[in-house]
């Protein structure tokens, strides 16, 4: 049957690396060299809400909350988001976009669309649908 897990792990890591390198390069070319790929991706779910709790952002991105906190601090320090602490529960923080963050989201979405189009060039709609179905089946099989 072969070592499919090892092969898939290698392929997934190569795809992720290629995607992130391309995203990082294009964001830098657009003037956002202080916006790493994970942070860029984090701006999109924040843009869908007036404010978004850190825990919701972590769930949306599939990150652990401990990973989100430094990411949020980095985005705040760079001026992309503002953080608000819940008045009733000081342990809960919310993120909202600044003007700079809203401008960045437009660029991030455009770059993501371009990279996605390039990544799937020559891949039929049927193959994309099959790949999506298979990946979701694997996730379900592994209990996620």
Image: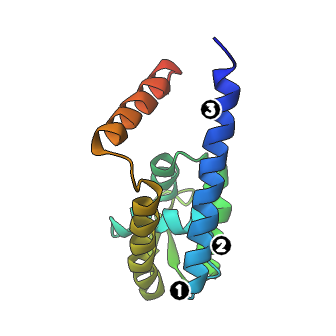
Of badges 2 and 1, nearer the viewer stands 1
Q: Is residue 72 visible?
A: no
Residue 115: image x %, image y %? Answer: 47, 65
Which residue is the site of mark 3? Answer: 8
Total labels: the figure holds 3
Q: Residue at x 64, y 65 (%)?
A: 21
Q: Please tell me the numbered disc located at residue 74.
A: 2
The crowd level at tag 2 (other Cα within 10 Å; few <14, some 14-19, many 20+) is: some
Which residue is the site of mark 1? Answer: 30
How far apart are labels 2 and 1 at the CA level?
19 Å
Q: How is the image coloured?
A: rainbow
**Could you say whether the residue bearing mark 1 is in a helix, strand or loop?**
loop
> Is 62 left or right of 106, judged from the image as shown?
right
> Is 83 left or right of 102, judged from the image as shown?
right
Near-viewer residue (80 or 127): 127
Residue 74: image x %, image y %? Answer: 65, 72
Near-viewer residue (94 or 127): 127
How far apart are labels 1 and 3 at the CA level?
33 Å
Q: Residue at x 64, y 82 (%)?
A: 33
Q: Is residue 78 above or below residue 58?
A: below
Q: Quadrant of the N terminus?
A: top right
């Amino acid at each position: 049957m072969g070592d499919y897990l090892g092969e898939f792990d290698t392929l997934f890591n190569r795809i992720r690396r290629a995607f992130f390198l391309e995203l990082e390069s294009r964001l830098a070319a657009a003037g956002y060299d202080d916006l790493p790929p994970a942070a860029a991706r984090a701006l999109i779910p924040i843009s869908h809400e007036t404010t978004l709790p850190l825990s919701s952002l972590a769930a949306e991105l599939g990150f652990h909350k401990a990973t989100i906190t430094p990411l949020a601090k980095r985005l705040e320090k760079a001026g992309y988001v503002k953080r608000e602490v819940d008045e009733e529960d000081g342990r809960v923080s919310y993120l909202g976009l600044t003007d700079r963050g809203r401008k960045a989201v437009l660029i991030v979405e455009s770059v993501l669309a371009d990279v996605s189009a390039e990544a799937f060039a020559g891949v039929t709609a049927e193959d994309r649908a099959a790949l999506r179905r298979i990946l979701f089946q694997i996730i379900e099989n592994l209990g996620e």
